[in-house]
Amino acid sequence: MLSRFDLRRDLVVFVLAAAACSSSSTRTASNSATSAKADKRVEKLAREKEAVVRFFQPMAIRDGDWLTTQKEAGETFEEYIASKPTLPTSERRTIYIQPIGKFTAAQKRAVALSADYMKAFYDLPVTLNPEIPLGNVPADKKRHIEYKNNLQIRTTYFLHDVLPKRLPKDAAALIAFTNYDLYPGDTWSFVFGQATFSERVGVYSLYRLSDTTFGGPNDKDRLLLRTLKIAVHETGHMFSMKHCIKYECLMSGTNHLAETDRRPLDDCPECMAKVAWAMNYDPVKRYQNLAVFWDRNGRPDEAKQFRAKAAAVEKVQ
Ligand SMILES: [Zn+2]
Ligand SMILES: [Zn+2]
């Protein structure tokens, strides 16, 4: 049984976004003609994002939520553009998923569908690599904790030791999925995932995502929904997107699984515009692709919601 202290520590943390400023930008020096064209895109997206505001709830902060423990400033669409984010380039366009360790059949399905969802979400090719073993983890990058008598691996083992040397030349991002529990540093109890803002590598754990200790939807797809949310959220960080504080949004930080469960399966208007701009992805096409994903994967209400968003944006185009 968890003590109050353990419970509090156990509720900790979704994602530590490794705070490094992005260094690479895909945009080349522009002349005035291309700037004007770029401004038109920004103007158009600014209009299009307003068309979907009604589908989202303003951020509501409850006890124990991420924003009760973290002070964050948020980031508008315009601030994101000004931040010169790390983006896919013409040479680096593929998202690679690297499973590490062993997985259950349900987890394998969740990882495979995350690959499909990321493709629809970011409009980039996604390659799912064959599983590889964990390898020899140095003693200072692993520990045992009492929770389920668990072995935890420090995220830096993946982010520094394993992934950079495996980063393909055409990778927009290389994402490790693992069934090992993760921790980012000695003062943290665990972390669901960690991504870098500029190094194009990230690691996500499925270890706790079936957990109902702290509640969770009575939903056959609980593991799948949580995996998709974490995958897309962390990938957003890899394209330099900061946490969202304006709406209940897929890019909002979460402190515990109930908060993860509450988040929608989509980016809010502000974050949608960032993705559409970063990937040069028409929001109507994006919403339609996401609707098709949910048609194929048995959630007609989600599909309907995405179609309604597509129709709302189409009206202002
Ligand atoms: Zn995050
Ligand atoms: Zn957002």
Image (cartoon, rainbow, N blue to C red):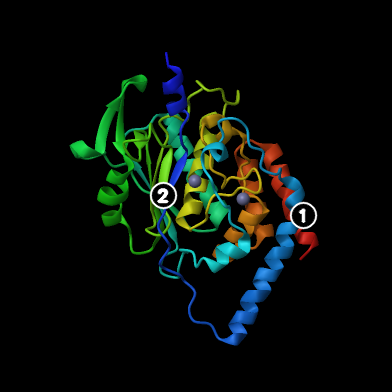
Count neighbours of disc 1 (C-alpha within 10 A) and say few if under 14, some if 14 to 19, many if 20 or more. some
**Numbered label tally:** 2
Seen at 50% across and 58% down, the residue is 124
| Disc sitting over residue 99 in the figure | none
User: Element at badge 2?
Assistant: strand
Q: Please provide percent x and percent y for residue 159.
A: 32, 49
Q: Is mark 1 within 8 Å of ligand 2?
A: no
Q: Which of marks 2 and 1 precedes in the sequence?
A: 2
Q: Please provide percent x and percent y for residue 151.
A: 29, 28
Q: Please provide percent x and percent y for residue 131.
A: 32, 41
Seen at 47% across and 29% down, the residue is 11
Q: Nearer the viewer, residue 264 or 254?
A: 254
User: Element at badge 1?
Assistant: helix
Question: In the rendered image, is residue 312 in sight?
Answer: yes
Q: Identify residue type, mark 2.
A: Ala
Q: Identify residue type, mark 1.
A: Ala
Q: Please provide percent x and percent y for residue 2.
A: 42, 17
Question: In the rendered image, is residue 281 in sight?
Answer: no
| Disc sitting over residue 311 in the figure | 1
The residue wearing badge 2 is 195
Q: Is mark 2 within 8 Å of ligand 1?
A: yes
Seen at 61% across and 47% down, the residue is 245
Count neighbours of disc 2 (C-alpha within 10 A) and say few if under 14, some if 14 to 19, many if 20 or more. many
Quadrant of residue 179 within the rendered picture: top left
Relative to residue 151, is residue 71 depicted above or below? below
- Residue at far bottom of view: 32
Report the quarter where the N terminus lies.
top left
Q: Nearer the viewer, residue 51 or 14?
A: 14
